[in-house]
Structures are given as structure tokens and as C-alpha cells.
Amino acid sequence: MLRRLARNRLYWKHMFAQAMTNGNETQMTQGTPFGRFFLHEKISQGAMAEIWLAADKEGNNFALRRLYNTSIFGLKTKKLFVRGCEILEKIHHHPNLIGYYEHGKIEGLPYVLLEYVEGHNLKLAPSRFPEVVEAYVGNILIESAQALEHMHDNGFMHLDFKPENIMITRAGDVRLIDFDLAEEKPDKPKKMDKHSGTPAYMAPEQLQRLPLDHRADIFAFGITAYELLTNKKPFNGDTQEEVIRRHVDPNFHIASTRQHNPELPLALDKIVLKCLERDPDKRYPYMSVLVRDLKTALYVD
């Protein structure tokens, strides 16, 4: 199925759009004013911010992300939010990054106005639309990799690459989101001032607070790809502490993706395992090389 992917893409675009339309759209409510926008429905909420479906007076729809109106967030959190907005503003001109319009403050709350896409993040999509994700798996891998490639080529690392930060649109395309933890890509591995991210997707050098570079994103891509292809985690464990120990333990053997899914091409298995090398020097040196190998393995021009 992976090898037929490119030929079937237009058909599955139509099927994905139909699936997203059939009874799953939340009915619009009367908008609550927020500056010059009207907030219609809450799309999602996280630890420090919420995302709303918003519209302007002309009826154009957007995704509006804003910090919660609470005093528990200090200056550091607000700086992270604004910095993520500034980075996205610089690099958003790419089909696999979420579209950016503006950021600022309304009623004292930092906000960012983004492209509105109908779909689910990659953590939810396999359970909501398993047949679509299965058909699109090759494109999801390639477009996610291309998003990171674009970031790296423009001088930034994401540093929180994970399924929750990959949107699958109703057209069946990828949008990379959430740039709050992004950092400038150093010329050589550099120790970061802050230790942030999602431990289950962190590279060993991140977890050990060692100098790192863009290859930490490549490791995170490897974990995400492994999970997508096998529905298993490469570093399993009963507790988060055990999972993290296995991330950094060179003696822990990572099972082949083909052990869980024998139909996967051998070349694709080798790509994923190369991303998961604990030594950064043994991983792919650049996302461009990884994208090239993915396209070759999946027979995509």
C-alpha cells in the first residue's frame, strides 16, 4: 500500500474530506467578541494556551491561539509564546507549516492568528480515521520530514516534534504546529539554557542535557515514524522513568519496525532505525538526506 500511495493520493484526498464532513463538524455558536474577532468554539486547550475557531467581521475563519487569562504564568512563559510566534512569522511560508497571519495582544492577552484547518493531530487521527491514516502514511512521513527540513534550512530547530504537533488537514495534508520551544540551529552542538520538551520524544542528548543540534529533531522524527508505522513505541516501559532510561541505554535493543509490521519495506525500516541511533553522528546528518531516502523507499518522485 505504501508503494501505491502517490497514485492514490487524489482519491484519498476526496475520501478524507468526505469523512471529515460526515457529521463530525461542531455546530457554530454565537461568537464572543475578542478585539476585532469573534470566538465561536474552543478547538483545543493546553497547559498554558487555548485555541479558538475565530472569525473577523468579513467572515474569514482563523485559528486564534491565546494565553490563558491567569496570573500564574510569568514573564518567561509569555516570552516563550511570543518567541514561538516570531519564529513562525519568519518561516511559515511552506505548505507543511501552519499558516501565520499576525500576533500581538488583545485585552492584555498575547495571541497569535493562524490558518484554520479542519482535521486532527496525528495522535488522534489513527483512532478517528484509521483507514485514511493507513492510506496516507507515506505522505504523512514525507510531509512531516519536509516541514522539519524547511525549519532547519531556515536556521531553526523545533525541539518538540511529536504526533500532537502534527496536524492532518481535511484535505489529507500535514501542518506542523507549536513553535514555543523552537531554538536557533547552532553551527555545532550547543548546550541549551532550558531543558524543555516532551521526554518520550527527546533525543538522549536532550535528556542528558548535553550539547545538541538539529539532529535531536531527527531522533524525534524517528520515534514518531516508528509509532505511526507499527502502533508501538520503540522504547517501551511500565513507567516514564523506565522509558527515559531506555532512551539513553545503548544496551537496550530497538526492535525492527518489520517485527511489528512485516509488510513494511526493508528500506523504510532502515531509515527509521537510523533516525533512532543514540549517537547523533550515526543519525542522518540533514533532513534533506532523510527526505530523499524516504521518497526513494516509498517510490515517490
Image (cartoon, rainbow, N blue to C red):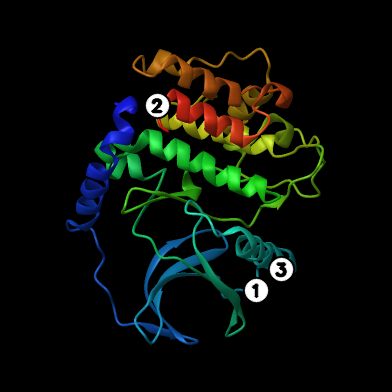
Evaluate if marks 1 and 2 touch, with contact meaning CB atoms under 8 Å apart: no
Q: Which residue is drawn at 44% across and 14% down?
A: 266
> Disc 1 marks which residue?
71
Tell me, yes or no, whether the two marked residues, 1 and 3, touch with CB atoms within 8 Å. Answer: no
Q: Distance between the residues labelled 1 and 3?
A: 7 Å
Q: How far apart are marks 1 and 2 (CA)?
A: 52 Å
Q: Say few, some or many: other residues with alpha carbon within 10 Å of mark 3 (under 14 / 14 to 19 / 20 or more).
A: few
The amino acid type found where label 2 is placed reads Tyr
Mark count: 3
Residue 68's spot in the image, x, y percent? 55, 71
Q: Which of marks 1 and 2 is in front?
A: 2
What is the x, y in percent for residue 259?
Answer: 42, 13
In the displayed orientation, state which residue is furthest to the front. Answer: 301
Tag 1: amino acid: Ser
* Residue picked out by circle 2: 299
Q: Residues within 10 Å of mark 1 (few under 14, many from 20)?
A: few
Give whichever of 167, 72 is nearer the camera.
167
Position in image of residue 178 (x %, y %): 56, 56
What amino acid is labelled 3 in the image?
Answer: Gly
The answer to whether mark 2 and mark 3 are in CB contact below 8 A is no
Q: Is mark 3 on a helix, strand or loop?
A: loop
Real-space CA distance between mark 2 and mark 3, rounded to the nearest whole angstrom: 49 Å
Mark 1 residue element: loop
| Quarter where residue 6 is shown | top left
Task: Name the residue that disc number 3 marks.
Answer: 74
Which quadrant: the C terminus? top left
Nearer to the camera, 43 or 289: 289
Label 2: which secondary element:
loop
Closer-to-camera residue (108/104) = 104
Q: Which residue is drawn at 60% across and 36% down?
A: 288
Q: Where is residue 83 in the image (x, y as percent from the top left)?
A: 69, 63
